[in-house]
Amino acid sequence: MKLQQLRFLVEVQRQGLNVSGAAETLFTSQPGISKQIKLLEDELGVIIFERNGKRLTGVTEAGRRVLEIAERMLRDAQNMKRVATDYAQESEGTLTLATTHTQARYVLPPVISDFVRLHPGIKLQVHQGSPTQVVDWLRKGEADLGIATEAIDAIPELVALPCYQWSHCIVVPAAHALAGRGPVALSALAEFPLITYDATFTGRSRIDRAFDRHGLKPNVMLTAIDSDVIKTYVGLGLGVGIIAEMAYDAQRDANLVALPAAHLFEMNTTRIGFRRDLWLRTCDFDFLVRLAPTLTREMVMAALRGGGHDEGL
């Protein structure tokens, strides 16, 4: 049994039993993967994948158990490398972050800048995507740490720790009718076309819930995953924007006015997550505490012992 055979098994499953897709992802040949899977089945004495001719059509009951163990063994092998790096060459290695555009654009730059000064030998990789993509990258082991506001706290195999809370704000051109009023009412907001985040991004669920609670139907005429895109179209006069408060900068966005919206929408909590079985290196802990000073090594380990979510933090 070889680790490479286990990688083939797991990737074939991830590719929906598409051996060609697995071969492309792993930079190898389809016949090579098929041969190694057959050799492993012969060694174990069980059929892992059901077949119709040469095509894989399903996973057997024994195959499901083998795949669970294979995934665990691959994670353990990855952790062995992380342990070795942490103890032997602490100043070297790679830290892969998965996050959304808002976090990458507005929150992480000073954190990453500080981290790089502390660990100049660590190479950083930043994957940007939706919260569900962040979760998927974490679960597959393609990212070490994931940062998002949505989705990340709902996955049992992930530890999800709160970093900070934030509110939405309303952005309009300086001459807009809302700019001269006092606190904006939700009913007034519902009278205008709205430009805000895609349904799974940046606290959008809390925006929707606020309108639902008041029996209002918002006129969301444009959605985006990028705060800068939202502000661009607001500046063109196409609608009223609802964005994360950290995405507004009075100097950079001088053509827009920001209005408070904390009284309209629930507070949002941005969390950082990682696989429960991940070996956290010294550099990982250093990144955590720079993102959120409360996330000391002691606090993180206490969260792991206590269940891995927000309890006690």
Image: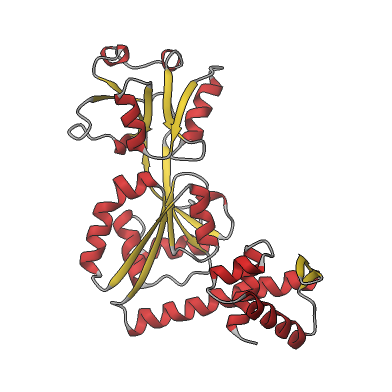
Vertically, is 284 above or below 269? below
Residue 74 found in image quarter: bottom right
Please state the horizontal and vertical placement of residue 89, each as a whole percent of the image: 32, 82
Q: Is residue 102 left or right of residue 187?
A: left
Nearer the observer, 88 or 34:
34
Vertically, is 192 above or below 20? above
Is residue 65 among what the camera can see?
A: yes
Please state the horizontal and vertical placement of residue 230, each as a whole percent of the image: 36, 32
Nearer the observer, 38 or 127:
38
Q: Is residue 253 left or right of residue 89?
A: left
Please state the horizontal and vertical placement of residue 261, each as a whole percent of the image: 36, 25
Is residue 293 among what the camera can see?
A: no
Nearer the observer, 79 or 276:
79
Mark count = 0
Write the residue at 42% across / 38% down.
268
Residue 272 found in image quarter: bottom left
Quadrant of the snapshot with the N terminus: bottom right
Q: Is residue 303 left or right of residue 183?
A: right
Write the residue at 36% across / 16% down.
184
Vertically, is 298 above or below 253? below
Vertically, is 52 above or below 313? below
- Residue furthest to the right: 52
- Residue furthest to the left: 251
Write the residue at 42% across / 35% down.
267
Write the residue at 48% across / 24% down.
220
Please state the horizontal and vertical placement of residue 92, each as a whole percent of the image: 31, 77
Q: Tell me how the rendering is colored.
A: secondary structure
